[in-house]
Image (spheres, helix red, strand yellow):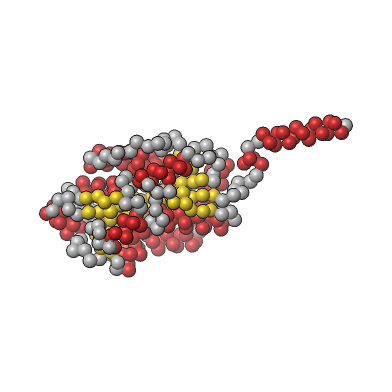
Amino acid sequence: MNRRRFALGASALALAASLPLRAQTKYPNKPIKFVVPFAAGGGGDVTARMLAQRLTERIANPVIVENRTGAGGNIGSDFVLKSPADGYTLLNMSSSYPIQAAVTKLPYDAIGDMQPILMVSRDPVVLLVNQASPLKTTKDLLEAAKKSPDKLTYGSAGVGSIAHLGMEELAFLAGVKLVHVPYKGSSQAFADLLGGNVDMMLTSATFGATYIKSGRVRALGVAGTARLGSIAEVPTFEEQGIANFNVVDWKAVAGPKGIPADVVAFLNKELNAVLQSKEVVEKMKAEGTTAVGGTPEQMMEIVKSDIARWKRVAEMAKVKIE
């Protein structure tokens, strides 16, 4: 009988050892890493840190933020999509992700290697100039650009960022030419805007609202067909004669393909709860952003749709990124 019990015990231990570690321990049981593929201080970084803090509080497990910059966000994206598919290394992606997929040869499959988790937020973009700039309105910008082609400069978070291709689309629709000055992140581009080293910068309304209200920058226009409550004094480009400029900067969370379905469901549920919390709802509303939430499948549809859209824009504006 003792030998029989020993044999059964040994079999059970062998079976347990053969099971994935995830099946033996409840997720999460170690820190979750949010990778931001752009520099600290930018809009994506701020959103990631807010999510990390709120998620840490909800699940009583550390969620840390790590910035991996370069190549228009591709270095950080590549790192995450080639990480173990265990739910502990996640990508805080933005609308630059489908832009890169649309116009760049990537070291990963933007759709096939990515597991969507949640669409976080949507922000129309706003065009900023230094407070001391002689450009007071979009009309001033267009007149100056037509008078001196290829003279006015704009900063961005890097080649292939939404601030880059979005600005190229705006220039195309307005019939002007501008000079692109790429940086390693939007915070660096913004610092040079404040310092007067670049003439303008396209950024999310959420990021720009505080600086607009403080008077440190001036907004020439906002994308979309309606003004934003948070910066109601800023007219849309449509009001100013530039139709069909509807660029939206979104933020989302994803991971490498192969994350277990129960882990994806857990993260989706908890992040949806974060976005629905009173504090986050009020904070986003005050900033003029829209919390999205929803399912992984809905997020994937947005990514696919945006890849197709940016391919059309790149062809229209004759933008090619090597």
Q: Residue at x 79, y 32 (%)?
A: 8
Q: Does residue 235 appear in this view?
A: no
Q: In the image, residue 295 lies at what x, y percent?
A: 48, 44
Q: Quadrant of the N terminus?
A: top right
Horizontal side, residue 130 vs residue 253: left or right: left
Q: Nearer the viewer, residue 109 or 252?
A: 109
Q: Residue at x 54, y 46 (%)?
A: 88
Q: Residue at x 30, y 66 (%)?
A: 216
Q: In the image, residue 78 lies at what x, y percent?
A: 43, 41
Q: Does residue 190 appear in this view?
A: yes
Q: Nearer the viewer, residue 267 or 255?
A: 255
Q: Choose top left, top right, bottom left or bottom right for residue 132.
A: bottom left
Instruction: Name the outermost residue toward the left.
Output: 147
Q: Residue at x 49, y 61 (%)?
A: 278
35 relative to 50, above or below: above
Q: In the image, residue 136 lies at what x, y percent?
A: 20, 63
176 relative to 138, above or below: above
Instruction: Name the outermost residue toward the right.
Output: 1
Q: In the image, residue 302 lies at what x, y percent?
A: 39, 43
Q: Nearer the viewer, residue 177 or 172?
A: 177
